[in-house]
Image (cartoon, grey):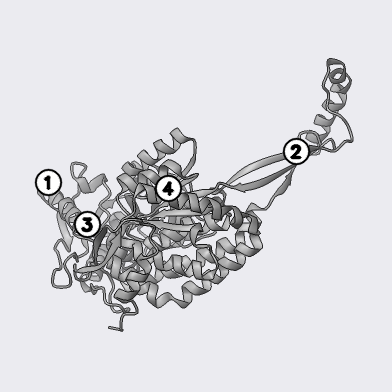
Amino acid sequence: MRAMTASPELFASLTDDVVASGSDTVPVATPSTGETLHELPRSSAGDVHDAVARARLAQLAWARAGFAERRRVLLRAHDLVLERRELLLDLIQLESGKTRGQAFEEVFGAASLTRYNALAARRVLRGRRRRSGVPVVLTTRVRYRPRGVAGVITPWNYALSLAAMDVVPALAAGCAVVQKADDQGALSILALRRAFIDAGVPEALWAVVTGEGSEVGEALTDVADYICFTGSTATGRRIGEKAGRRLVGASLELGGKNPLIVLDDVDPEQAATDAAYACFAAMGQLCVSIERIYVHRAVARAFTRALIDRLEQAKLGSSLDYGSDFGSLASAAQLARVEAHLGDALALGATVLTGGRPRTDVGPWFFQPTVLIGVTPSMHVYAEETFGAIASLYIVDSEEEAILAANASEYGLNAAVFTGSTRRGQRVANALEAGNVNINEGYRGSYSSFAAPMGGMKQSGVGRRNGPEGLLRFVEPVTISAMTGVLQLPRTGREFGALEQPLLLLAWVLRGIRRR
């Protein structure tokens, strides 16, 4: 195992950047050993209000700086993220327990989306002429005004990349950010922020607070001009209700019970290898991970055998190198949730095809990747999001049956289809009720396409991150119309009478030449 880049001194330096006026701290453990990694300061509601006030002042200058300056700073941040990748990889692994490869996906993704937003912001958000109601007489333009201070609430599971998906487009759009970081991912976020500060982002423009959601999260959603939240559907509903009462915008990426359809024309070995990663990357602790597998009966035996072989041969570990295939659950609470779902399913008649046991020989919260069969609607694991280390396998007899089963969920975040035919894959993808659909890949195709929108349907959330849609979240469109002076619009009955026929003629001419 390579030497660790991070150190206790670095941890202390990073946590000094948390906006916290008191001396209270909380110990944060590393999943690799269960021992305390560092002490994290606790913010208060007052700290949130102070951070937002300072961010508002910084945002005024940042918005006036213009697209070219923001582009320069963000591209420099992109470079620093890549230059500091070893440190960021260490911190992600130490906090989350995931493998080096899955940590690299986060760092590479954060850099890529930073580059996209830096280069796309001007094209997406610059002012444009629009056709006016009365051509020649009026001109109309639309400009985009930054919303102000975005409140970003991020989870622990993909702390760095999910933070970047909300923070970076907000900065590119000219907004400030106050972010509530989860305790388990704070170091990764603070190190990412440090790279952006060193690139030229004003310190007050991106503030990080920590603490209980009931105090710090509530305070942030009370005062932010726009709210970004990634987390559970239950919490997302409460945040959405508050945003609605305040009449501020919100984007909410929530839970998923994501399906994978394995059709009868696949290579079973290849499909099983891809399915294993789709289900158990980050030990399934990812909103877009696959939890339901629907495999066609014609290939079910070969696919199941290959999936079991792949998972039983996989190496579990969290060493700071590329030697492990799958990592650890992130906490004792995550382990308890997985064991509760498994115990309930087994008590009600499900069968373990592979896995189903803790791996304390590797670390305190490791769990063998588990695949169940015989799962029924009476079990928690059937419809509830497990968010870790368990997938359920179902055998189907047709493509249509698989589609109906995949769509029979209150969630609609991610879905996947494995097939030997791209055309067939597109047909199935078009029938699936999910905001993101992947063909011959579990989730990484859509997850890494930063120029395309990402988000959920049904109970999986509202709004979209990434792409032009992700930038447009953070601005208010303002329509500005001006009289040209060529002709005065009618104001009196006589003037309306005189202009009725010319305006009707104009309407018919525009219809004839198909002008909008």
Residue 497 horizontal side relative to residue 192, left or right: right
Which amino acid lies under the numbered mark 3 shown in the image of this protein? Gln
Residue behind mark 4: 49
Could you tell me residue 498's position as x and y percent?
A: 89, 20
Tell me what residue is drawn at x 42 percent, y 75 percent.
85
Which amino acid lies under the numbered mark 1 shown in the image of this protein? Leu
Tell me what residue is drawn at x 25 percent, y 70 percent.
310
> Which label sits in the foreground, 2 or 1?
2
Seen from the viewer's position, the closer of residues 382 and 35 is: 35
Mark earlier in primary sequence (4, 1): 4
Marks 4/2: CA distance? 37 Å
Marks 2/1: CA distance? 66 Å
Q: How crowded is mark 1: few (under 14 residues within 10 Å), some or many (20 or more)?
A: few
Residue behind mark 2: 481
The reply to whether discs 3 and 1 touch (Cβ–Cβ < 8 Å) is no
Marks 4/3: CA distance? 32 Å
Could you tell me residue 263's position as x and y percent?
A: 36, 57
Residue 348: give its label. 1
Residue 406 seen anywhere in this rendered image of the structure: no
Mark earlier in primary sequence (2, 1): 1
Residue behind mark 3: 334
Q: Quadrant of residue 236?
A: top left
> Which label sits in the foreground, 4 or 3?
4
Tell me what residue is drawn at x 58 percent, y 54 percent.
173
Which amino acid lies under the numbered mark 4 shown in the image of this protein? His
**SS at circle 2:** strand
Marks 2/3: CA distance? 55 Å
> Which label sits in the foreground, 2 or 3?
2
Question: The N terminus is located in which quarter?
Answer: bottom left
Name the residue furthest bottom.
2
Which amino acid lies under the numbered mark 2 shown in the image of this protein? Ser
**SS at circle 3:** helix
